[in-house]
Image (spheres, rainbow, N blue to C red):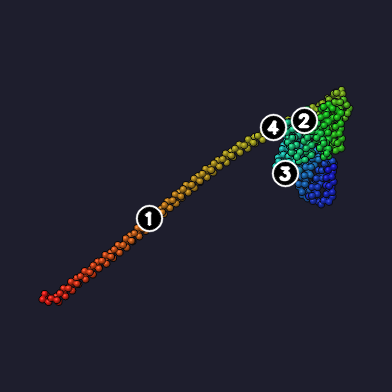
Amino acid sequence: FAQNKKIDSLKIVLKAAKEDTNKVNTLTTLSWQIRSLNTDTAITLANQSILLAEKLHYKKGVANNLSNLGAFFGYFKGDNNKALEYYFKAVKIGEEIGFKEQLGKTYGNIGIVYKDMADYPKALEYGFKALKIAEERKDQQVIGRTLGNIGVVYYNVPDKKKALEYYFKSLKIVEPLGLTQLQANMLGNIAIVYQDQKKQKDALEYYFKALKLAEEAGLTKLEANTLGNIASTYQDLNEYEKALEFYLRSLKLGEAQQDKSAMSITYGNIGNLYMVTGKFKDSEECLKKAVTLSTELNFQDNLKSWEQMLSQLYDTTNRPQLAYEHYKKYIALRDSIFNQDNEKQLLRSEMNYEYDKKKAVADAEHKSELIKQEAVAEEKSRKQNVIMLSVCICLLLVIGFLVFVFRSLRITRRQKEMIDIKSKITEMQKHLIEEKQTEIIDSIRYASRIQRALITGEKYIEKNLKKLNPAAS
């Protein structure tokens, strides 16, 4: 109901939209919202969005819709070749404009397609490319989804332990975010691993949790897949009536959506169930439908299983010629897949060898470069040390020179002061001597005056005496 309400709102917005990028985005969102309800309409809307985006030179809009078309054809139509065609077109534009958000999503979807085609190395390659971008962007929703997709690839390798690890990592992230579809996917994936581990009780617990979420959110394809998995679990428990009930519910949804991928698997599983329960005619009819759809979709792994079941059916019903013909087809498919796997393994080995060789050369070059850098750094450090030492020596010399000059100036100043003092003393002594000499001269002059006075007095006395005594003269 909530999904339909959102779709109705988008349709109203679309009617009033101008021919601009907002309309492109509205068409894109609307096509994505109705993808599980009506895939053909979703494809039509996506193509309309692309035409308008190209007219507006809005490359992000083109890339987003190309990526969505890849999902529509791959996930809902089961056409992997068409899906890859659209995905790689989206990648080309995304890489040109550096559209990281779209690239991360598309890398992840390419990984899913390669998983469906049993090319697990490429599936992991693109899965981890997607995870790296998501972690760089810190996009928790994409991280959660990508972790789950990587888990699916590990499941198919098969590495069930690793798969379960990635499923729980994903679930831990998506649960708090309220991402219903991702949460339901992870619950279902965890249930599949438990089913493989013969833990049917745990498997059913997680399957029904996933089914409840899918039904509430209107996730028809996921609901159909989960119904099929529940049926398979009941078949493991030999509860065939319940198994058939859930298979038929799954098939009904798949037919309504024209989901050939889901239909091919469900027909095969029902055919197997009918064979186990002795309904051979119904079994043959269902297995033939499964073969036709799987051949059309090029699902070789599934086709191999259906051919093997047909061979067993014809052998059980005493039709050896048909049993032999389908057994040969089974062997041919098995060998073809085996050879493809071997070729891929050889190619991976060759690529690993070339990578290791290039890495060894790169490591050697890197090591040589590090040695050169260390030598340059060491030489630079040595030069810096020499410069520092030279500077220190120069500073010491300058300081020593300044100390010498300072001391010399102090000595010179003291010498000058001493000379000044001596000069003053000499001047004082000279002055004192001069004063003394003056005093002596004055004394001499004074004594001379006294002497002259005395001499004059004698003559004066003598003169006066002669006057007084003429006879004496």
Identify the secondary structure beneath mark 2: helix
Residue 347 position in % (x across, y down):
71, 33
Frontmost of labels 3 and 1 is 1
Mark 2 or 1 closer to N-term? 2
Image quadrant of residue 103? top right
Dot in front, 1 or 4:
1
Residue at the spot x=77%, y=40% of the render? 178
Q: Which residue is mark 2?
A: 194
Q: Quadrant of residue 371?
A: top right
Find residue 366 and report its image quarter: top right
Residue 76, relative to residue 429: is it above or below? Answer: above
Residue 293 coordinates in the image, percent (x, y): 84, 34
Residue 22 picture location, percent across and down: 79, 49
Hey, what amino acid is under mark 2? Tyr
Q: Amino acid at mark 1?
A: Gln
Disc number placed over residue 349 in the picture, else none: 4
